[in-house]
Image (cartoon, helix red, strand yellow):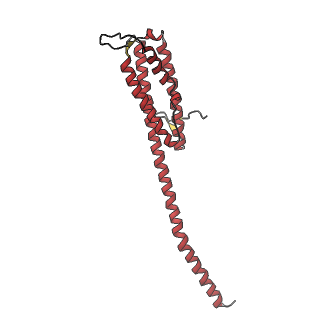
């Protein structure tokens, strides 16, 4: 092969490589930008879901604390204003359900039956209230622990605690999956490793 032909072939190959680089360079850059955009969108979606989990945990904690205080008052011999209790409990239940419904966007949902003792305690108190005559001077219906059939409040508090613990484990497992890292307990240096199903 003559030097002229070799030079010509070298020039053609060089031109093809340059043309290919001019085409593939921007394409690779576009792919890199698309990967970065997907990663950013994934991080944002994860952050939104973590906020939804936080809202659900807050709503569940508020409902739990409210029901626990009501049962503690009953144990202490204090009368429970049923109308006020049911109104507040229903509002907290609605908030917990709304927070649960928001979790659906990230692939998690707490069904009504999973609230367990939360629903059960409210409904048992509602049932005990139904048809009772007004007790207070202001015409309001009140319940005392004897109306529940003895030391029911203590047992119901334990049921509430276990229901909340199960929900907490499920939510922490979800957070662990979202972040792909265990949840660390502040101040202890340990991680929470909820049981895997």
Residue 22 x, y percent position in the rendering: 53, 74
Quadrant for residue 99, please give it.
top left
**Residue 147 location in percent, x, y?**
44, 10
Residue at left offset 42%, top offset 30%? 94
User: Which one is nearer the viewer's eye here, 144 or 160?
Assistant: 144
Q: Is residue 31 left or right of residue 78?
A: right
Q: Quadrant of the C terminus?
A: top right
Q: Is residue 16 left or right of residue 44?
A: right
Residue located at (46% from left, 32% from top): 97
Q: Position of residue 156 (x, y in %)?
A: 49, 18
Q: Which residue: 44% across, 18% down?
A: 126
Q: Is residue 99 visible?
A: yes
Quarter of the image holding residue 141?
top left
Specify the quadrant that holds the N terminus.
bottom right
Against 33, is 66 above or below?
Answer: above
Frontmost residue, 7 versus 161: 161
| Residue 101 on image: x %, y % | 47, 37
């Amino acid at each position: 092969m003559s030097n002229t032909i070799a030079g010509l072939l070298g020039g053609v190959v060089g031109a093809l490589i340059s043309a290919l680089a001019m085409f593939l360079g921007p394409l690779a850059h576009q792919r890199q930008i698309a990967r970065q955009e997907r990663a950013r969108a994934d991080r944002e979606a994860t952050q939104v879901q973590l906020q939804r989990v936080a809202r659900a945990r807050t709503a569940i904690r508020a409902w739990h604390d409210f029901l626990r205080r009501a049962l503690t008052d009953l144990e202490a011999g204090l009368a429970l204003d049923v109308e006020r209790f049911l109104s507040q409990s229903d509002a907290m239940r609605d908030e917990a359900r709304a927070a649960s419904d928001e979790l659906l966007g990230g692939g998690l949902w707490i069904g009504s039956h999973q609230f367990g003792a939360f629903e059960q305690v409210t409904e048992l108190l509602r049932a005990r209230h139904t048809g009772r005559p007004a007790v207070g001077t202001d015409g309001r219906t009140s319940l005392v622990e004897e109306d529940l059939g003895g030391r029911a409040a203590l047992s119901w508090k334990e049921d509430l605690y276990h229901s909340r613990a199960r929900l907490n484990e499920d939510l922490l497992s979800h957070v662990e999956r979202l972040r792909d890292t265990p949840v660390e307990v502040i101040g202890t240096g340990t991680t929470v490793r909820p049981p895997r199903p």
